[in-house]
Image: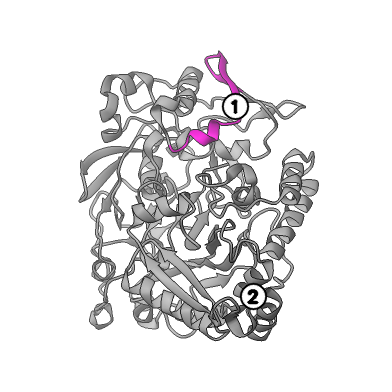
Amino acid sequence: MRGAILLLLAVACGAWHAGGAACPPDGTGAATQGGGVAPSTPPSAVARRVLRRPMERVASMDPLRAASVCDAQAAGLVYEPLLEVDYRARPYRLKPCTCSLPEVSADGRVYTFRMVEDVRFTNGRAATAEDVVYSLKRIADKSNASGGMWIMDGVEDVSAPDARTVRITLREPLHVFPWLMAMHYAAVVPREEVEAKGSAFGLTAVGTGPYKLAHWRRNHEMVFERNPDWRGWKDAPDAGHAIDEIRYLVVDDASTQWLMFLTGQLDFLGAVSRDNWDAVVGPDGLLLPGLSEKGMTLNASGSLSVFYIGINMKDPVVGTNRKLRQALNCAFDYPQWQRHMNNRCMPSTGPVPPGTAGRLETPFAYAYDVEKAKKLLVEAGYPGGVDPKTGRRLHLELTIGRATNDAREMAELMQSFYARVGIDFETKYMTWDAYLRAVSEGRTQFFLLGWVGDYPDAENFLQLFCAKNVSPGANHGCYMNPAYDKVYEAALAAKTEDARNALWREAQEIIREDCPWIFLYTPKSYSLVWNRVKGYTPCDFPYGAEKHWRLEK
């Protein structure tokens, strides 16, 4: 798999990346004046139920081109894939969308999907199985160069035996395949609209979903109107309170977003920045009483993502010295990092985040322990952090893809951790595009990245260590271990979930011992809503989520 969204250290650098600027979980890099502004009650609703929320710039409404989180959120209002993630179920599970849950052949290679009733495009035409086949083949077409092409890598054939049946044959069994059919890339699009509009298709939107794109002032505002003919409204609870209009407003500055929310110009704020933290959250981790009394709710949850310092395993200093890599993990002072982050994170104990099927739950042997780090440095050949070749402190270099104030502060904090054990951990800054090229080409010694899952299975994270995925694939550190690959492939071939998860845990044991990363943290997600917004639930798959929300007048 190559689909998980690549992240720059979002809290430090203010951007999630997936081929374009994506929605930051924390708008950083701007000073706040929010603490001195008295919050107001949101303005009374007019006849139409209108939701206003900030959003990063959307590059394209074509699901094929929706490479960022925000692209996918916008496209998810209009377009629908074959399946969808159940918005409220925990642990996550799949449910029908344009198709019912599939029938799977005994050998695990053939998936048969049946289209649900009354799936219609907003141009009035009924969607058929041929539309699904066209949409999936469009993703697989190399000439389209879709960032989602990987979801079709294992597909041998797609066909429509009749107008309501889709049959997908895989080359080999792949237990996570249904999750791929819930991704926004797999959305159903009308062929006639694609062919008529050509390269301009992404500037419009004709889907089968709950909303229609009514207005798009690029880089300023997107307006979506409820699609009254969407089949889902018929059986939805409180459909009469569903949102009639959604306004995505491009507001770059975190302080401005906060002030707009305080004054009722926004109904939802998807993140609480570190700069604004003390103006929102008290020492107990709860929303400040004055804000809750005004009608706000603070939501907190974990996230299906991991942040890490990647290690170039081809580097002659760290790539061949496992004891050194273990020592670097032990020297990372997570408790101090957590305090710096206002407790907005959880410790990373390996490559798989909490809440993921197959995660290894045992304690990490190389968690923060300065004395252990010093002992491991002796075993690594660097007693006291001194390089015997030079007689000086061991010099290591971390590369970061942004040079914001927050990034520099966090880099300085990390440098202080390693200075305690005698290591000089220098930081180098690059532009984002140059940084991605440098990481992909193996020109960094250490690099700062993150990974957010496409589906809640350990495979989506453990693929980052497969030899077949070395850079420019997702294995950017070029970690290669035949023993690991053997366990990974055995897990993919496992016949039962229990057997597969046992092998995933074995694979994690190998990774945690080899330490090809410095494991940092899993971020916590915080969001704010005015209480007139009902039905909101924090979710790692927020694409088109507003259809589940309701607004009180």
Segment colored magenta: 147-168
Q: Secondary structure at mark 2?
A: helix
Q: Earlier in the sequence, mark 1 or mark 2?
A: 1
Q: Where residue 80 is drawn, which disc sits there? A: none
| Looking at the image, residue 552 lies above or below residue 487 | below
For the point 50% across and 40% down, which residue is it? Answer: 183
For the point 68% across and 38% down, which residue is it? Answer: 175
Q: Specify whether 362 is left or right of 413.
A: right
Is residue 244 a member of the stretch shown in magenta? no
Check the image and tell me how it is coloured. Answer: one colour
Q: Specify whether 342 is left or right of 483.
A: left
- Local packing at callout 2 (Cα closer than 10 Å; few below 14, some 14-19, many 20+) is many
Could you tell me how far apart the alpha carbons at marks 1 and 2 are, in whole angstroms?
43 Å
Q: Specify whether 41 is left or right of 549.
A: left
Q: Which residue is mark 2?
A: 327
> In the rendering, at what x and y percent does residue 281 appear?
41, 79
Examine the rendering and report whether any part of residue 406 can be seen. Answer: yes
Q: Amino acid at mark 2?
A: Ala
Q: Which residue is mark 1?
A: 155
- Residue toward you, 25 or 418: 418
Q: Amino acid at mark 1?
A: Val
Mark 1 vs mark 2: give the one in front.
2
> In the rendering, at what x and y percent does residue 389 appear?
58, 76
